[in-house]
Image (cartoon, rainbow, N blue to C red):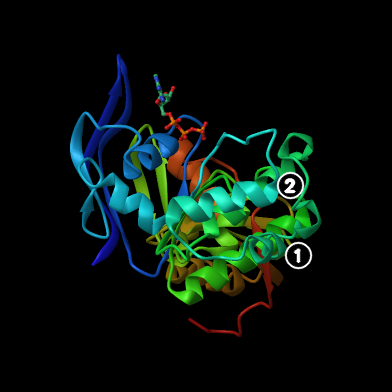
């Protein structure tokens, strides 16, 4: 069974269409990264998932429970960290966690929860005086109460210092190993890339792309190969490379040939053409797309002349290698 099954979900707020016929699912046991620019509809999706907002059309199921009719059952099995959740200024961290324990009917030890999220010393302090990071850690602790089957985390690293974000990743992995499905919504791509099995990128209420980071990289396989050469490449070489299937763009400077190509085969054929041309093939680098670039292309469209991705240095291929 899917942990989350979203089918043809539409949500309108007056004239604004926040979600537009959105469908996707998250299998049980997965860490799913839900990415999207500001206003894409991430929080709206989460609010519908938890039954806080009713959709205009479509359906949402969490572990088979309908989000409209059975939101209580969903919330019982879910630990949620929501953006802008309420902190009660006058009660202590321990009392916050105790409230979460009561609400879930769980039997966690509140001090162990606070220890796990790194703020044991704050147990008896009133939350009104907490820093942003302490508030966030407390909220993460509250979400973990009762060993939920699903963790819904909306921008969980907000306010956390680098140690906090690392500890958060550890907690997410531990929870996942325990069997929890994790729905991680964020626009912080490196956080998502570090921990998620699969990502979906939302834009204007629609899923524009979905898959493992490796799958998405392969889809967007238009890497740039930069070949360093000793002599300027002649026009005949450039037009030969332009003729290779999968090559999208070729540019040359005095000692470089830049080839934008889709697919590893096109890159290799271009490299071999340069090598055969006798222009003094020195070495080459390729820029494979990062998740950040995938996100950028998915949400803004292709960008021309990109040259700042992850650099993989490699030696020149052997003569005749194909
Ligand atoms: N209660 C509301 N009333 C009116 N419009 C709303 C409401 N909630 C959301 N919207 C609109 O729906 C769209 C999606 O908003 P949403 O908060 O879901 O985006 P988001 O992806 O979570 O953005 P962010 O990353 O900025 O938090 C936006 O255009 C937003 O203005």
Task: Label 1, secondary structure: give it.
Answer: loop
Image location (x, y in percent) of residue 74: 32, 52
Q: Which sits in the foreground, 282 or 71?
A: 71
Q: Quadrant of the N terminus?
A: bottom left
Q: Residue at x 69, y 56 (%)?
A: 165
Q: Is residue 7 in view? A: no
On the image, the x and y values in percent for residue 263 come to 43, 65
Left or right? Give the position of 172 relative to 75: right
**Depth check: 45 or 203 in front?**
45
Rendering quarter of residue 116 = bottom right
Q: Which residue is mark 2?
A: 134
The residue drawn where x is 51% and y is 72% is 268
**Left-right relation of 36 to 192:** left
SS of the residue at dot 2? helix
Mark 1 highlights which residue? 230
Asked if 5 appears above or below 214 in the picture, the reply is: above
Crowdedness near tag 2: few (<14), some (14–19) or many (≥20) residues, C-alpha within 10 Å = many
Where residue 300 appears, as percent x and y from the top left, is 47, 36
Drawn side of residue 260 relative to residue 62, left or right: right
Most foreground residue, 218 or 29: 29
């Amino acid at each position: 069974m899917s942990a989350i099954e979203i089918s043809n979900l539409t949500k309108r707020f007056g004239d604004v269409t926040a979600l537009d016929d959105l469908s996707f699912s998250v299998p049980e046991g997965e860490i799913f990264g839900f990415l999207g620019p500001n206003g894409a509809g991430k929080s709206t999706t989460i609010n519908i998932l938890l039954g806080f907002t009713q959709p205009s059309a479509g359906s949402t199921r969490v572990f088979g429970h309908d989000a409209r009719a059975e939101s209580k059952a969903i919330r019982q099995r879910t630990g949620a960290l929501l953006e802008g959740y309420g902190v009660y200024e006058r009660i202590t961290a321990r009392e916050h966690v105790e409230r979460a324990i009561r609400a879930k009917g769980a039997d966690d030890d509140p001090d162990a929860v606070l220890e796990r999220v790194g703020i044991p010393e704050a147990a008896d302090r009133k939350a009104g005086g907490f820093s942003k990071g302490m508030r966030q850690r407390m909220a993460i602790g509250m979400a973990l109460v009762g060993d939920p089957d699903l963790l819904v985390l909306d921008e969980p690293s907000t306010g956390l210092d680098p140690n906090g974000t690392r500890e958060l990743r550890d907690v997410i992995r531990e929870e996942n190993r325990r069997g929890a499905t994790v729905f991680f919504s964020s626009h912080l791509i490196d956080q998502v890339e570090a921990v998620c099995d699969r990502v979906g990128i939302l834009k204007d209420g629609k899923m524009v792309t979905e898959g493992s980071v490796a799958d998405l990289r392969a889809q967007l396989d238009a890497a740039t190969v930069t070949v360093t050469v000793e002599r300027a490449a002649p026009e005949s070489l450039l037009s030969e490379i332009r003729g290779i299937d999968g090559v999208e763009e070729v540019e040359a400077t005095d000692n470089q040939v830049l080839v934008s190509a889709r697919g590893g085969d096109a890159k290799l054929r271009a490299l071999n053409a340069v090598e055969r041309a006798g222009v003094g093939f020195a070495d080459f680098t390729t820029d494979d797309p990062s998740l950040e670039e995938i996100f950028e292309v998915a949400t803004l469209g292709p960008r021309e002349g990109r040259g700042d991705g992850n650099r993989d240095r490699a030696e020149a291929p052997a003569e005749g290698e194909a």
